[in-house]
Amino acid sequence: MQVAQQQSAARAAPAGARVRARPRVVRVRSAAPHVAGIREEAIERGKHDKPESFNARFVPFKDVQQGVLSGEQYSLDTVQYRSKDGGLLDVYHDMDALKQYDAAHWKKLFDGRVGTTAWPYGSGVWSKKEWVLPELGDDDIVSMFEGGTNLFWAERFGREALGMSDLWVKQCGNSHTGSFKDLGMTVLVSQVNRIRKVKPGSISAVGCASTGDTSAALSAYCAAAGIPSIVFLPADKISLAQLVQPIANGALVLSIDTDFDGCMKLIKEVTAETPIYLANSMNSLRLEGQKTAAIEILQQFDWQVPDWVIIPGGNLGNIYAFYKGFKMCKELGLVDRIPRLVCAQAANANPLYQAFKKGWASYEPVKAQTTFASAIQIGDPVSIDRAILALSDADGLVEEASEEELMDAAARADRTGMFNCPHTGVALAALTKLRERGVIAPSDRTVVVSTAHGLKFAQSKVAYHSKEVAGLSCAYANPPVPVREDLGAVMDVLKKTFNI
């Protein structure tokens, strides 16, 4: 266009006149400006943020039990799983530093981060970063924007099955790998990511023993961070969906001819002898992520405290994690009480239930028997002392469910719109028993924690609805009806079923 205008001007000029041509304009397309990713934006933002005094460290869990710090402590950058006396460790937060801000500040801060894509605060875990790992750099975090799972109002199931008006199911299985384990694994793998940077060669891989869900979460987060992962699985004791997840994510999968407790013994021996980092819940880092589900429940209820929270229990870290989340909210003034907690165990793997029935007078491991709730098929839980502390302080209870009770409870709830894993069935069965005994009132606001997605356990549902489970009546089975390709035959079935 500019060249044509110059030629036109030359033609219009008087004869002999000298036309001064404009310099030719050459347009060069500049390179696309660099667009910072959300992680880079967070790093840049952090350069200008005012440093806070929040901090956390490992202390012996015994100190937490006794309410007095002994002075023994370890940096979170230390590869340490046990205290000097062999006991568990706990992540201890400087509560005085957190109390510099009032409850209104924390509520506004946490509420303002919900649903955003700001790194890393859009995560349901890292939106509470100051209460999780406050000193971890944003660039070290390995997150898939986990958490933020919905509270399902179980209106129909509550009304028709239990006579309840305020029953909710926290759908922790609506997460990246299909279970609540994502909440803890983002924290553990993020800390490992940091340690590998500041102490090169100190950690070569991350390993875990698993009944399925832990291995899925570990392998996914390690894959995202480019960190090798190793999982020890009990052979033929987990679902196909759970088995294929770590395989797909590139983990080294060892299928071992033992149960979970045998796998746990082996992984502890391996991590004691090698630079392989232990990712099981005896490592208290994971519990820091899992506790955010409790905080999230309060947040979703506009900081109102439910009366009861029912949690399936196997290795028992999660019951303590929920307690810890509720307890922090109370100590920092966001709520004035904590809910009563119920730990629900499968009758085939119920060491905590047995101890509860004895009034906590004694605890003995059991040999876990096969249960459809395979993720909690654990006879010697690592976090037994943590669970007893949590339940004692929260005026809690322990209930058990037989195989028939847990499968029927899951199937009955499925008929009202849910799609429950067997572990959620354990919790629903426990709730049913407590309602029948009048322990939980019809108007009590009750939250059942669903720990995994039902699709991970489709095989058990197929067996139930096919009535192929020996010893179970499968009262709520709904098998498909075979029909000929014939309108009359189809109409016969419809008339019989719907009275039309």
Image (cartoon, helix red, strand yellow):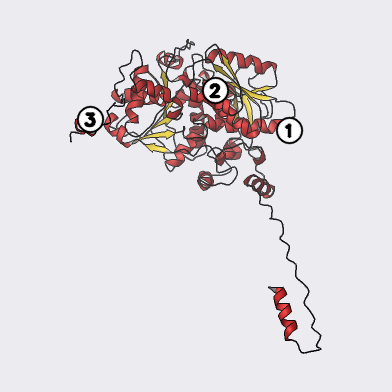
Residue 210: which quarter of the image?
top right
> Quick one: SS at disc 1?
helix
Please rate how many residues cluster around mark 3, counting C-alpha atoms within 10 Å: few if below 14, some from 14 to 19, many from 20.
few
Is residue 396 in sight in this rendering? no
Question: Is 334 situated above or below 63?
Answer: below
**Label 3 sits on what residue type?**
Ala
Q: Name the residue carrying label 3.
A: 489
Residue 78 spot, x, y in % from top left:
69, 26
Residue 33 spot, x, y in % from top left:
69, 55
As measured in the structure, the alpha-carbon distance from the residue carrying label 3 to the one carrying label 2 is 67 Å
Residue 168 spot, x, y in % from top left:
38, 35
Is 444 displayed left or right of 380 in the figure? left
Q: Quadrant of the C terminus?
A: top left
The numbered dot on residue 65 is 2
Q: Quadrant of the N terminus?
A: bottom right
> Quick one: SS at disc 2?
helix
**Label 1 sits on what residue type?**
Val
Q: Which of the two labelled residues, at mark 1 and mark 2, occupies the earlier sequence position?
A: 2
The numbered dot on residue 198 is 1
Residue 438 spot, x, y in % from top left:
29, 25
Is residue 495 in sight in this rendering? yes
Q: Which of the two labelled residues, at mark 1 and mark 3, occupies the earlier sequence position?
A: 1
- Which is in the foreground here, disc 1 or disc 2? 1
Given residues 176 and 29, the one toward you in this image is: 29
